């Protein structure tokens, strides 16, 4: 079973490209974004609007309430069902998103017989510990794995992070005795990576954050706080949300809030690129040297050749 994955750093334009490819190849889109699965987190996560969808069916958005948890295992199960349904109707499934662990879990399968590990997730948790305090992470662990939380000292940052890492990869607490053997990968996937120069990417990210604030991000966070969404929960760990909370609480000025969100987003994009560059299967498309029409044409050509069984070298299309 064949699918196309459009990957790349946040803010580079993956969603827009995927929509155009879906229109060319009669496809439907599955979002692989660990924060766009939450209802009510729209502006700050860059969720596509109905207008931006251009009539292309999208899945993987607004799946759960912001008070709930959602794991890699949950995503893989959900996405597999959507892929089979889309393929059964003779359409092309396109998986689009920057949550690399979601894409990897879907395409390669995950073997949790051995200890689950993700350096990217671990780095993200470490950053949260540094910025929010290990107490916030321990409170989150109490919610998802109370047995491990009770066993670990609240200040034992390394073990607290490890317990959360296992939970968010497997969907099961570290304290549980589990053996999960997922099915072997069943998907023949083409990975198209969208990139651009660092200067252009950072410019896009900075402008995107400013546009999100103008589009109502602060009001969105106010609504989440009013409904009592836990600040230490998984949903509120999306980039920027805690800084908006700090602004609303008078702990940060507007310029400081915007600057900090831009900085965190740039760092996240750098980590995404670093992870994806390690995968030699990714066919990179550089939008720094391709205009929109050229980008669509080159990506479409690559998909057509892939379907035809013509091998292409893993180079960067310029």
Image (cartoon, grey):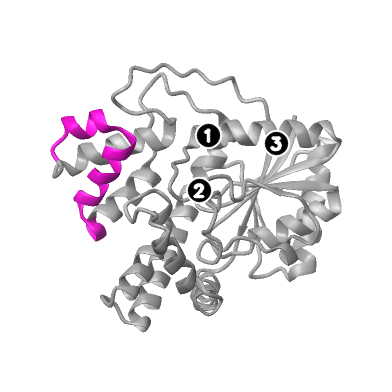
Residue at (56, 76) in percent of width and height: 215
**Is residue 283 covered in magenta?**
no
Residue at (54, 66) in percent of width and height: 43
| Label 1 packing within 10 angstroms: few (<14), some (14-19), many (20+) | some
Which quadrant would residue 108 be assigned to in this image? top right
For disc 3, the marked residue is 82
Residue 262 lies, in percent from the top left, at 42, 72
Which quadrant would residue 291 be assigned to in this image? bottom right
Residue 144 lies, in percent from the top left, at 34, 36
For disc 2, the marked residue is 65
| Label 3 packing within 10 angstroms: few (<14), some (14-19), many (20+) | some
Which quadrant of the rendered structure holds the C terminus?
bottom right
Could you tell which of marks 1 and 2 lies nearer the N-terminus? Answer: 2
For disc 1, the marked residue is 74
Residue at (49, 73) in percent of width and height: 209
Q: CA distance from mark 3 to mark 1?
A: 13 Å
Magenta stretch?
A: 130-153
| Label 2 packing within 10 angstroms: few (<14), some (14-19), many (20+) | some
Q: CA distance from mark 3 to mark 2?
A: 20 Å
Mark 1, secondary structure of its residue? helix
Residue at (43, 35) in percent of width and height: 169
Residue 107 visible somewhere in the drawing: no
Mark 2, secondary structure of its residue? loop
- Image position of 101 (left or right of 310): left
As drawn, the label of residue 291 is: none
């Amino acid at each position: 079973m064949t699918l196309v994955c459009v990957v790349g750093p946040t803010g580079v334009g993956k969603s827009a490209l995927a929509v155009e490819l879906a229109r060319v190849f009669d496809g439907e889109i599955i979002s692989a974004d660990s924060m766009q699965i939450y209802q009510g987190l729209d502006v700050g996560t860059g969720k596509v609007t109905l207008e931006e969808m251009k009539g292309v069916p999208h899945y993987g958005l607004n799946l759960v309430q912001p008070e709930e948890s959602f794991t890699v295992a949950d995503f893989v199960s959900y996405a597999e069902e959507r892929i089979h349904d889309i393929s059964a109707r003779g359409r092309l499934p396109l998986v689009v998103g920057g949550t690399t662990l979601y894409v990897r879990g879907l395409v390669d399968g995950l073997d949790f017989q051995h200890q689950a590990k993700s350096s990217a997730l671990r780095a993200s948790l470490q950053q949260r510990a540094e910025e929010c305090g290990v107490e916030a992470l321990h409170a989150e662990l109490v919610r998802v794995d109370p047995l491990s939380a009770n066993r670990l000292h609240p200040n034992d940052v390394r073990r607290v992070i490890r317990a959360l890492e296992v939970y968010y990869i497997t969907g099961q607490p570290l304290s549980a005795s589990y053996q999960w053997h997922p099915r072997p990968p069943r998907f023949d996937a083409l990975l198209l990576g969208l990139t651009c120069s660092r200067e252009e990417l950072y410019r896009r990210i900075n402008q995107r954050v400013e546009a999100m604030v103008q589009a109502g991000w602060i009001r969105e966070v106010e609504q989440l706080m009013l409904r009592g969404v836990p600040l230490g929960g998984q949903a509120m760990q999306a980039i920027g949300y805690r800084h908006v909370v700090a602004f609303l609480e008078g702990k940060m000025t507007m310029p400081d809030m915007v600057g900090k969100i831009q900085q965190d987003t740039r760092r996240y994009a750098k980590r995404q690129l670093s992870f994806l560059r390690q995968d030699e299967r990714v066919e990179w498309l550089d939008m720094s040297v391709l205009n929109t029409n050229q980008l669509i044409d080159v990506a479409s050509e690559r998909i057509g050749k892939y379907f035809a069984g013509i091998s292409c070298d893993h180079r960067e299309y310029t």
